[in-house]
Image: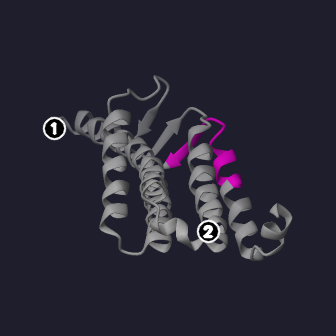
Amino acid sequence: MLMQIILHTPKWVFAVFVLLVWLGAKQLLSNSVSLTRVTLMPIAMGGLSVYGVLSAFGDSLGAVLGWAAAAVVLMALVLQRPLPATTRYDAQARQFHVAGSAVPLMLMMGIFLTKYVVGAALAMHPELRQQASFALAIPVLYGAFSGIFVARAVRLWKLAIATDAVATGVRPA
């Protein structure tokens, strides 16, 4: 059955998978990341996450609220953690120097694989949409991924704002 699922998967899905693995694998090494990329990645992955919820459950208020609640909770938790000590922001270049991390790869794969597995499960068992546990667990999972992604970007933005404030002599709000 697994082979049938894979054989009936559109080819573009594999291209997206490879792209996400490549993007995530690049994050395993220390590198410099632009302010734009720090902003766009959580937006893109959050959009994919929301799309996963909406494509599976339509405009179900419970699903959307589950996604939002999980996103807010995980954001709050991650925002309490400090950035790695080696993280730096270069205000002139508008770039962050960050240590390598497996977290972005895991988050990207988590969102992708959740979308893939949920799509396959719903194709074989459309009645799953009506099961409360499924309709709650999947949006919460998507929301958790999104919350972590966004919080990681917000922590970097806070560093950029603080660095810019020190450089200009203005105290951050």
Question: Which mark, residue 152?
Answer: none
Label 1, label 2: how many angstroms apart (C-alpha)?
A: 50 Å
Q: Is residue 102 left or right of residue 167?
A: right
The kind of secondary structure element at disc 1 is loop
Q: Which residues are magenta?
A: 21-33
Q: Earlier in the sequence, mark 1 or mark 2?
A: 2
In the rendered image, residue 100, in percent from the top left (x then y), is placed at 61, 34
Q: Residue at x 60, y 69 (%)?
A: 122
Regarding residue 93, the answer to whether it shows in the image is no
Q: Residue at x 69, y 46 (%)?
A: 25
* Residue ID for mark 2: 119
Question: Which mark, residue 170?
Answer: 1
| Mark 1: amino acid | Val
Q: Quadrant of residue 81?
A: top left
In the rendered image, residue 87, in percent from the top left (x then y), is placed at 47, 31
Q: Residue at x 66, y 37 (%)?
A: 29
| Mark 2: amino acid | Gly
Q: Residue at x 53, y 65 (%)?
A: 128
Magenta-span inclusion, residue 32: yes
Q: Residues within 10 Å of mark 1 (few under 14, many from 20)?
A: few
Magenta-span inclusion, residue 5: no
